[in-house]
Image (cartoon, coloured by chain):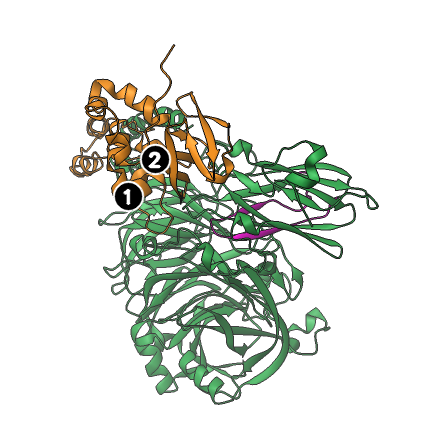
Chain colours: A orange, B green
Amino acid sequence: MKKIFSLPLFALSLLIGSCNGDKKTTEESATSDAVVTGGQEAVKDDESAKDVVKVAVGSKDHTTLVAALKQADLVTSLSNAGPFTVFAPVNAAFDKLPAGTVEGLMKDDKKADLQNILQYHVTTSSLKADFFTDGMTLGMVNGDNITFSVKDGKVMINGIATIIASIPASNGMIHVIDGVLLPPAKK
Amino acid sequence: MKHNNLKVLVPALFLSVGLLSIQGCKPKGTQSAVSGNAAAKVYVAPGKYDEFYNFVSGGFSGQMSVYGIPSGRLLRVIPVFSVDPEKGYGYSEESKPMLNTSNGFIPWDDLHHIALSVTNSEHDGRWVFANGNNTPRIARVDLKTFRTAEIIEIPNSAGNHSSPFITENSEYVVAGTRFSVPIGDKQDVPINSYKENFKGTVSFIGVDKTSGKMNIAFQILTPGINFDLARAGKGKSAGWFFFSCYNSEKANTLLEVNASQKDKDFIMCVNWKKAEEYAKAGKGVKKAVKYAHNTYDESTHSATSTMENEVLVLDPKDCPDMIYFMPCPKSPHGCDTDPTGEFIVGSGKLAATIPVFSFTKIQAAIAAKDYDGSFDGIPVLKYASVLHGEVQKPGLGPLHTEFDEKGNAYTSFFVSSEVVKWNVQSLKVLDRIATYYSVGHLSVPGGPTKKPHGKYLIAYNKITKDRYLPTGPELAQSAQLYDISGEKMKLLLDFPTIGEPHYAEAIPAELIMKNSQKIYKIEDNKNPYAAKGDNFARVERKGNEIHVYMTSIRSHFTPDNIEGVKLGETVYFHVTNLEQDWDVPHGFAIKGANNAELLIMPGETQTLKWIPEKVGVFPMYCTDFCSALHQEMQGYIRVSPPGANVPLTFSTGKTAPAATEKKDTVKTK
């Protein structure tokens, strides 16, 4: 999608091909050379409701998650039409992990591990909290399942993270959770 | 898909550039008209925007299309006078009233001309007006939404060709009748009593400064001739309007021959400020007529059609000094005023010259009563007294003229298939360039305004023949883009159009894009059938009607299981798109619906009427790819025989077994 083809070559072919070698050619193709396009996250739109990424970016409690999504190259995907359900751990949830875990995952050579963890927090369907029932399992984007337990109206995931708030976004639902979900170890 | 397209496109682009360049060295042939750097001049890189919007009439398609210039990329087709399955226009219950007329619902008309709204004779980017030619109407399209906002029918008119040209501050758009017709109570008359019983009219449709809402302010009754095209004055001539007319012979048969007898027909000069005064002073007569006035309300997403029954008619007999005829050679077609407002260019389809009239001289001739007799009691100005001069031997079959900001005019020649550039002051021909083939209208961005942007000229051709890969007997009419920034015009690009392009206007993109609306706010949705949230979704029976208040959001309908509908009942699906995200419409279709589907914009409510004709379970689904789970966005509705004992129920997301159905899974009405 984001393939950028070689415009200097295009300009060159024009120069060679042209009989009169019009000076304007060089100038005009040089300006069209700088084609840099972002993904859907770069769309300028102040009218629509915010998507899940924009909601997370606007939350001071999710700076670690946002940094991780960027490092894992997931920003474009989560700005897509979706729909998504995102379980969004707060900064404090990341802080509960053993010291050095987050820093380690943020290294370039650990990108695949980081992606695996973050994709374990996302499913492609927009689900409200009252949809989750005790004992229900749900398939996540990384291919593994999460399991819900519901007690006294509180929804807990994998027995370690509780939904503390739910925020609708233009392309899905964000459920703020107080723990980080770790995918089961690969067998 | 996009990947594949790029892969094909890129080599194709290289190849075509190469070919163009090679052919650029050949001395002859049509391709040699394209200079080596043409491709670079029309290339708008992926993710970049065009410099101008080009609003192009769709002719017999009844629609208007929007292109980017210089790329020639089609951006949008706006349905106006014809139904359009791509937008649901004319199919949804909400939009059907837009196509109502005094003759009932008309699904297809003929759209010829475009008029962008102006302030001080410069484009302001608010509205674009268009004429319905066959069943006379004028439409206003809102440029925030690119939707038809209003259509008004024109009574006492037939073939609304001389329309919808616009005055300096969009005070009025005009509608001159092509056909003269019997006017008044006596409608059943012999056709050959034309000279006695047939009259023409030109209507002035007022445009509200703030809302844009139209009303027919007054009509001027004229002799029984044909009106062709028109232009308002500008600056010094802003209080005047100029209409080209033909058939001053008043022929009612074989006009091809019989309307070409006289050396000169007319341009009718209307002092519309004076006409406005007469109308306000009560000089007009209110005539009983019947015409539809249709408006689309953006808060209810619904159109209403009102039948009006009166129009104010000004008779020149009672209103002196309001209209004058100016002789113009041989059935004038184009009638164009230059950016200064001083010159009026008449293009006689069969004339060997292009006469250019001077507004200053017209005023002097009127003051001095320098007349050459009269026509049906209306003074005819002396040709020599009002003429600035004639362009000699310009080409064959002059039709339309646009202008640049340097005092030059560009006239299209249908018969000799060319555009000729000439200087308005000196009347000297400066350049000529071939079109492919048989050109009609022209457009220079801002060309009909005080402020032309003389960078490009677009020619809209009637014949395409060998310009594209053949597609059977009919080919897409071609538009051709020329670079007119230098002394010599240069052909840059061919691009196909929809229907048949007649007049078109182009406007700097920044005047429109900044106002473009992205979504409809759900809280502002005032459609009486809206369900502004899943919790408002429901099914209700009202007598013989079933009303489904349905919501759609990625990626489901609520409700998506409906039972208890009986054969013989009429079902209305009122679907509200709960999305608040730009460019995420949902569609709605149900198997066997013989009317339509729906397309619903974010925040909008639209209604599909469905009369089931069989007993059974009917699937329904979203037709506009909305999300990763678009293919899952579906539901069922069960239709039972008339006497069946199936309660009316509805649900979403409940899959419990039938035994517990009543208790757990469905809300029962």
Identify residue type, mark 2.
Ala
A108 over B415 or under it: above or below: above
* Percent of width and height locating residue B642: 82, 46
The answer to whether mark 1 and mark 2 are in CB contact below 8 A is yes
- In the rendered image, the residue lying farthest to the right is B643
Q: Is B606 inside the magenta-drawn segment? A: yes
- In the rendered image, the residue lying farthest to the front is A152
Disc 2 is attached to a residue of which chain?
A: A
Query: Which quadrant does the N terminus of chain B fall into?
Result: top left
Disc 2 on helix, strand or loop?
strand
Identify residue type, mark 1.
Ser
B444 over B651 or under it: above or below: below
Q: Which mark is residue A88?
A: 2
Q: Which mark is residue A59?
A: 1
Rate crowding at label 2 as few (under 14), some (14 to 19) or many (20 or more) other CA atoms within 10 Å: many
Disc 1 is attached to a residue of which chain?
A: A
Front in this rendered view, residue B88 or B547: B547
Front in this rendered view, residue B355 or B303: B303
* Percent of width and height locating residue A21: 18, 33
Front in this rendered view, residue B268 or B167: B167
A5 over B545 or under it: above or below: above
* Percent of width and height locating residue B343: 32, 69
What is the distance, in whole Å, between disc 1 and disc 2 at their CAs? 11 Å
